[in-house]
Image: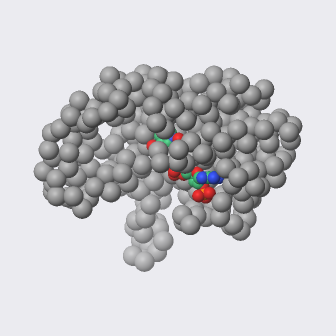
Amino acid sequence: MRILVTGATGTLGSALVPALLRAGHQVRALSRTKRESRGNVEWMWGDLVSGNGVADAVRDVDVIAHLATGGRKGRGAVDVTGTRKLVAATRESGYAHLLYTSVVGADRVAIGHLRHKLEAERLVSESDLGWTILRATPFHQSLDRRLGDFESLPVLTVDRTVPWQPVHAGEVATRITELIAAGPAMDEIEYGGPQVLSTEELVKTWLQARNLHRPCLPVRFPGSLYAAQRAGDLLTDAEPKGRITWQGYLFPPPPEPSDDFAAEHTASPTSPANQPEQDPDLHVYGGDEGYERPTRG
Ligand SMILES: NC(=O)c1ccc[n+]([C@@H]2O[C@H](COP(=O)([O-])OP(=O)(O)OC[C@H]3O[C@@H](n4cnc5c(N)ncnc54)[C@H](OP(=O)(O)O)[C@@H]3O)[C@@H](O)[C@H]2O)c1
C-alpha cells in the first residue's frame, strides 16, 4: 500500500516509517522541512496548519497515518485545524483509510491538550472516511526527554499518587502497522505499556539509569489534569499491551549473540559485526531499511 505519514520526523514517526517499509509498504512522509526522497520514502513538504502542500500529500494514497501534533504547547493548531484540513483534502482527493493517533484518556479528561485530541478524534470519526483511532499512553522516549529537562535541578519533586503506564514508541509503531493491515476499525483502540508505575518509581529508575543522584521531594501535584491521572483516567487495561517495561527501555539488553557465533568472534575488533548498537531503539524496530532518520530542523 502507499501510506502517507504525517509527523514522520517525530518520536513515533521515526519508528513507524521503517516499520512500514519492513512490512513492504511505500511511504510518503510529510514534513514542514524540505527533504530529499531516498529509497522507498518519498518526502513531501507541507504544513497542516496553513494547508500548504496537503492536497499534493494526500493524492493517490491508500492510508494516512496521521501522527503530526503540536504537542501540549501547540494550542490545538496542528491537532484540530491541521486535522480538519487533512480530512477535507482527503475527501476531495477520493478515499483513504485515516488512522489518527490520540492519547489514552482523551475521551475521559477534556482538559488542555487532551481536549484538542478529542476534538480531532471527532473530526476523524465523523468524516465519511474509513478510520481508526489509536489512543496510546505516554512514550518511554518522551518521558525520558521530559525528565532530561529537569536534569539540572538540584531536587526533583515526585507525587507518589500519580500513576504512569509508559509504552515504547517502537511497539506503538508495530501496533499501527498491524492496524493498517487490518483496514479501518471504525473504532477507538487503546494501547498502553505493560506496567503501571508511580511517579516516584518512574523518576528513581530514570535517575539510576542516567547515573544521576538527586533527592526526590514528595509533593502533591496540583491541578485537574493530575487529579484525573491520580484517579486512573489516563491508564488502560486494553489488550494487547506493549511488552517493553520502563526498566527494559532504560537498561536495554545487550545485543543477542548471532547464530554465526564463531564468525563473529573471529572477526577483527574493528569489524562492523563487533560494534555495539549505537541506537538503543534498534533492538525494537530494526535497522533503517533505507530510511535516514531525519534530525529535527
Ligand atoms: N509523545 C507521547 O508520549 C505520546 C503519547 C500518546 C500519544 N501520542 C500521540 O502520538 C502522535 C505522535 O507524537 P510524537 O510524540 O511522535 O510527536 P512529536 O515527536 O512531537 O512530533 C511532532 C510531529 O508533528 C509534525 N508537525 C508539527 N507541526 C506540523 C505542521 N504544522 N504541519 C505538519 N506537520 C507538523 C512534526 O514534523 P516537522 O517538524 O518535520 O514538520 C513532527 O514530526 C501524536 O498524535 C501524539 O499526540 C504521543
Location of residue 231 (image quadrant): top left
Task: Give the number of callouts.
Answer: 0
Left or right of residue 129, residue 265 in this image: left
* Residue closer to the observer: 59 or 191: 59
Dividing the image into 4 quarters, which one contains the C terminus?
bottom right
Q: Quadrant of the N terminus?
A: top right
Q: Residue at x 65, y 64 (%)?
A: 33
Residue at (41, 56) in percent of width and height:
280
- Res. 285 in view: no
* Image coloring type: one colour
In the picture provided, is 135 more to the left or to the right than 265? Answer: right
- Seen in the picture, residue 93 relative to 51 is either above or below; the reply is above
Q: Position of residue 146 (x, y in %)?
A: 36, 51
Instruction: Tell which of 158 and 260 is nearer to you.
Output: 158
Question: Residue 222 or 168: which is nearer the viewer?
Answer: 222
Q: Is residue 123 visible?
A: yes
Q: Nearer the viewer, residue 111 or 211?
A: 111
Residue 109: name its quadrant.
Answer: top left
Above or below, comparing residue 172 to residue 11 in the picture: above
210 to the left or right of 239: left
Residue 293: % across, % down: 57, 62
Q: To which quarter of the image does residue 122 belong?
A: top right
Q: Position of residue 222 (x, y in %)?
A: 27, 35
Q: Position of residue 282 (x, y in %)?
A: 48, 55
